[in-house]
Image (cartoon, coloured by chain):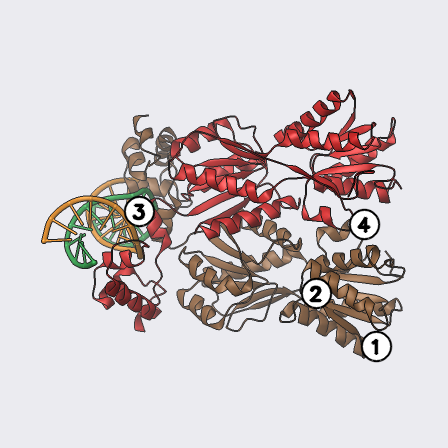
Chain colours: A red, B brown, C orange, D green
DNA sequence: GTGAAAGCGCTAACAA
DNA sequence: TTGTTAGCGCTTTCAC
């Protein structure tokens, strides 16, 4: 009890002394699958409990070179799709005894951030909706820290990536609108330089063309709530108003719906149909009942962890890319679509 | 270049050798405020850059006993108030060179989790909307890990806590409803055993009583979306329907509004007024325009970090409690309230 | 201002 | 199965 005052610094040596074994024995007792006699392990655990000993994960990391920490960089959490990913990823990692170091940072600052977190000997890095400069990608490869891009595929270097099949998602959206007789279409883009927005639009455009619709209007919402509101206003203030909108994500789609209804006095889907992307929790709320292309969060997270662990275990060093299938979730924001 | 292949293990010794100085000099060069000559520092930095050296934060932690990592435990991120807190906390910590280790866990599992994360030598622990068993609180104190409760004050042990002035928030809500002529009131509780729900109701009840309203109906929503929907149904399926609802948080208030409007065919605020708590981003959306009691996220986070750092620096070891002021954000969900 | 030496708490060979 | 020894990469006295 006396040593308890020593500021929590109960070490494996203390335990060893009390249990009458060597320090290695203590280490082994706390290492699953190590070769220790049952009796020894028991003695060690008893001594440990008596002293309130807990292995020091930092010291262990120093020697094993495995921190069991994965860093995740997210630009912001306002878009409700991101919290869903963070939550899932954290839980999934915990299940395997890993922990999540979370960073909030926009793409520009991400490089500087990576510098920092590489000092922490993280076992892997997940970049959500961000890319990596080629210099940094090379650096990560050199250091040997696995990186996987989540929800973005336009890496410059040789980096693994997990994303939805965004092109197919765009096609699905186009088909849903076309099949229900909409012809006067518009697309609300996210950020122009992102693979998600580009791919979704590419699939959309392609499917329209296949059906002989060669033109559609477009506005850029920058993946922001206000940006989407402005985009909606623009689309309806000049030219022929669209009868259907494909919006690059749900967060913007909701902003668009609100603007349409409460500012422009339009009814959804009676006057305008809206289709989103993500299937964020809010899309299911009664006020929106948004028809949307679902991104399958669970499989995406699963694939990300698999890619990470593959690289951690050096099973494969080469960059891989996973495209997760998407599907349409039919609700009430597209006129004529069976719900 | 040859040593680059050595799997990223460039150490301070390597740099020292190349720069022609001692290892200590390298350490000092990378320590802000250490006493090194400009020339030495420059030589060190050049060598470091040439070798692609980055200080090993883990090794540093082992000796300094400061990891610059703060752990945050959150039960879930579905309630949009939480992502806002996580985002702010992460950014605030980054500003001071700290990092956020995020855990998702419900209150029951939190104890087991703390066991784990104490192994990581975190500099502090923030428990969001969760409490701590007295045994664990004692343990944390013994180890010397600062713990602060966020958004909950009912700690058993001697633990610091930051929360809004929930009692006052309840009073404010009551006053807003009373002042606008509502008399047939109801309260939708969160979880009965949480300080937030209890304090908000206490203030509400107290203010009602002060105005001679001794009775109000109540239903429990368990701080969940579906729970709130059920609570709303219950309130309107039997007895005299309320003309105003005070809901313990925005996430539930939104669920209630949706149920009222889309399931029960009631108009808000024409038929029923609704007032929430938090001022979550969604409360401002056009579809809701929810009048609500704001929890000031920024000051709350600031206070939490201050409490943490105080304890880290051993300025104060005693548990402190901070109550952050709240205010009413007037929108359109309360009939008769100037908006 | 700088270097030598010691050691943070742990695990990984290697012998026994 | 167990103990001994060495050392992960860093910071920190303590001399100089």
Q: Nearer the viewer, mark 3 or mark 2?
A: 2
Q: Nearer the viewer, mark 3 or mark 4?
A: 4
Q: Nearer the viewer, mark 1 or mark 2?
A: 2
Front-lying residue, A67 or B92: A67
Which element is circle 3 on? helix
Write down the chain letter for disc 2. Answer: B
Which mark is first along the chain, 4 or 2?
2
Between the C-alphas of marks 2 and 4, the distance is 21 Å
Locate the C terminus of chain B and report the quarter of the image it occupies. Answer: bottom right
Please state if B80 lies on the left or on the right of A93 as rendered. Answer: right
Q: Which residue is mark 1?
A: B211
Q: Which residue is mark 3?
A: A63
Which element is circle 1 on? loop
Of the numbered discs in the image, which one, if any, rests on residue B287?
Answer: 4
Please state if B306 lies on the left or on the right of A294 as rendered. Answer: left
- Packing grade of label 2 (10 A; few <14, some 14-19, many >=20) is many
């Amino acid at each position: 009890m006396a040593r308890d005052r020593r500021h929590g610094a109960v070490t494996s040596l203390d335990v060893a002394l009390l249990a009458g074994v060597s320090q290695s024995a203590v280490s082994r007792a706390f290492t699953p699958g190590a070769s220790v006699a049952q009796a020894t392990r028991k003695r060690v655990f008893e001594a440990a409990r008596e002293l309130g000993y807990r292995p020091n994960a930092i010291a262990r990391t120093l020697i094993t070179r495995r921190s069991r920490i994965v860093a995740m960089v997210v630009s912001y959490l306002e878009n409700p799709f991101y919290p869903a990913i963070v939550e899932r990823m954290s839980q999934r990692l915990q299940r395997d005894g890993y922990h999540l170091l979370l960073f909030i940072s926009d793409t520009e600052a991400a490089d500087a951030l990576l510098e920092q977190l590489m000092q922490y000997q993280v076992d892997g890095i997940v970049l959500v909706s961000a890319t990596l400069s080629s210099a940094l990608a090379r650096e990560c490869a050199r250091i040997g820290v696995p990186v996987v891009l989540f929800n973005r595929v336009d890496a410059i270097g040789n980096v693994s990536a997990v994303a939805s099949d965004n092109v197919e998602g765009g096609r699905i959206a186009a088909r849903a609108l076309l099949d229900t007789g909409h012809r006067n279409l518009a697309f609300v883009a996210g950020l122009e330089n992102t693979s998600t927005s580009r791919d979704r639009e590419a699939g959309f455009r392609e499917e329209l063309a296949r059906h002989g619709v060669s033109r559609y209007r477009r506005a850029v919402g920058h993946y922001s709530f206000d940006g989407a509101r402005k985009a909606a206003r623009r689309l309806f203030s000049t030219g022929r108003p669209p009868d259907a909108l494909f919006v690059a994500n749900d967060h913007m789609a909701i902003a668009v719906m609100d603007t349409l209804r409460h500012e422009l006095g339009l009814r959804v889907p009676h006057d305008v149909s809206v289709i989103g992307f993500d299937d964020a929790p809010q899309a299911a709320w009664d006020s929106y009942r948004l028809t949307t292309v679902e991104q399958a969060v669970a499989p995406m997270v699963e694939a990300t962890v698999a890619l990470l662990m593959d690289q951690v275990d050096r099973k494969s060093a080469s960059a891989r890319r996973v495209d997760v299938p998407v599907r349409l979730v039919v609700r009430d924001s597209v006129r004529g679509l069976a719900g």
